[in-house]
Amino acid sequence: MNRLKHATSPYLQQHADNPVDWFEWGEEAFEEARRRDVPLLISVGYSACHWCHVMAHESFEDAETARLMNERFVNVKVDREERPDVDAVYMSATQAMTQRGGWPMTVFATPEGHPFYCGTYFPKPQFQRLLVGVHNAWVGDREQVLEQGSKVVEALTGGSTLPSGSVPTRETLTLAVQNLMQSFDQAHGGFGGAPKFPPSMALEFLLRYEGDGAAVAREMAGRTLEAMARGGIYDQLGGGFARYSVDAEWVVPHFEKMLYDNALLLRVYTHWWKATGAPQARRIALETADWLLREMRTPEGGFASALDADSEGEEGRFYVWTPAQLHEVLEPEDAGWAIELFEVKGTFEHGTSVLQLLHAPDDADRFARVRARLMAARDQRVRPGRDDKVVAAWNGLAIAALAETGAVFERPELVEAAREAAVLLEEAHVDGDRLLRTSRDGHAGRNAGVLEDYADLAEGLLALYGVTGEVRWFALAGRLLEVILSRFADESGGFFDTADDAERLFQRPQDPTDNATPSGQFAAAGALLSYAALTGSARHREAAESALGTVSVLATGHARFAGWGLAAAQAALAGPVEVAIVGPADDPRTRALHRAALLADVPGMVIALGHEAATADERDAAGEPEAGAWGRVPLLDGRGLVGGAPAAYVCRGFTCELPVTNPADLRAQLSASGPA
């Protein structure tokens, strides 16, 4: 039966024509397993996963393997990006049983969902033997199988994942920098060895850090950002970063491109430019932003989840080159130059190379010409597949990055793209005050948003408000944060990853550590902190500080997994600095003050932008559903024009310095606004 044909997940739809009788995750599958008295076989993956495709071709498209699966199991296919909660609880079981994890993830579970055998990718012969072995154990030794499942569940639900500590201090952050230094790769940038992932959250912290060793922290960030920008992990023709490098030198990527990586890195490169003015930072930020709009934007204005690693059945085929191919595309005098410049020397398989740019080209015009010719030729190749579902959390990250980048580099189309994504999220994903995780073609899926969806979207909306001054985004962020406080809080000051009324799994997931994206808990802390700075809300501030308690536990030994929390903690220790820009939006003096604030290298700073309270007629003209949505942001209250001129107020904890009306004076105040 083709149950996956109408799924909202492109990954599930890829399996719709398999001979396997797949179910989507849900009660129907559990009922069928109980009715037939057979185990569940839960297969978890995602559309851009190379080894997921391999296992699909080898096993799920194979008639004999499908027969074994259908006769002896109820088979459930899960998109980990659509159901991160399901993925999280079974990944915990997989890691506990095997000491490793990854995708595709293969889980055998009782009809109650209790896992009793887990693994990842299995080659077809091994997988077929496993199917037979698990079936025989279920039939012949049921008691032991059930006992194994019960033990796994008991072990995984025995306590919280990580104890909470005190609110981070300046000394905590200094220890975190020292911990990062211990694993820093002095030769190639980044942390640890191969495979090497973009350490986006740690880099954000290192750029924000203002304590002892700040110069060393920024040097580690700059060297890593430079190395990634020069390496093969960055698409030197089209822009955008791959998921990770299989080596320690950033040469050969795992070629899938994820929205979340590129949104996070876009923001970091923009912040690097604000901190240093490095031309490389500006180039990479703008090229990555252009890539997002060109290749990841959906017709509805959102951003797709991922591009596959594979095309025409081969990993990286779309991106790699041989010397002969360069000679085919370029003029003879340019081909040899390009071969040397891009290091086309057999860095990948079958004599092909991933393009690198280890040195700046000696002829900018020639470089632009060669790059354009190569890009045009590559556009004729078969493109990797695209997972076009819109994920709320990752679009929140993209909204924040595009809004800031567009404002900093005066690219209004980037700000408009961020705004259109926010409109889509508001219209398709927001259901009352609750949030749905995914949509496709403008239609929302049925899965509830998890903590990272609420937190990352709130973060993006607050950044968008700071750039546009549209209070609707501030108001929506406040509603999302209220749900976090009322539905996700635990009893120790942290947050669960699912709401208290979400589907009950055998374990309620709660992971406070960063992974490929900021942890939901740290993302919530950052957004709560910004909202508190804009509103003066002690409740939001206290919740943010409590959620950051885990940072103190991680900082000294595992700082790489707490980067977003460390960045939020640095902002908290710095205030954060609050800037109120008061004046008519169409007044060039207001815009000049606003731009001075946007360009300031003051990490974690929040900006309130507005003018005198709107009249009833203005509210009606704006089409706002209720007057409260147009109400002034509290940071603006009581702060008006100065001598009839637009003014800027630099504050901490709602205590402000004297207002200024000149951008130079504002820059001077902000440059002096180091740690309090």
Image (cartoon, rainbow, N blue to C red):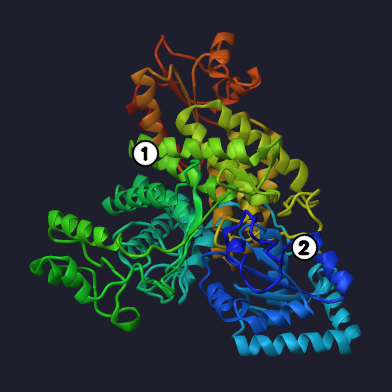
Q: Residue furthest front?
A: 1
Q: Mark 2 or mark 1: which is in front?
A: 1
Which of the pair 211/1 is nearer the observer? 1
Where does the image place residue 150, in percent across and percent down from the top left?
86, 75
Which residue is labeled 1 in the image? 408
The reply to whether residue 46 is in sight is yes
Q: Nearer the viewer, residue 119 or 462?
A: 119
Residue 313 in the image: above or below residue 441: below
Location of residue 633 in the rendering, given as x and y in whole percent from the top left corner: 58, 24
Q: Is residue 462 above or below residue 639?
A: below
In this view, the residue farthest toward the right is 143
Instruction: Check disc 2 and report the residue beneath it.
Output: 160
Q: Residue at x 44, y 74 (%)?
A: 313
Looking at the image, which is closer to me, 154 or 235? Answer: 235
Q: Earlier in the sequence, mark 2 or mark 1?
A: 2
- Can you tell which mark lies on residue 162? none
Give the spatial CA distance, label 2 vs label 1: 41 Å
491 lies left or right of 470: right
Give the residue at x 29% y 51%.
283
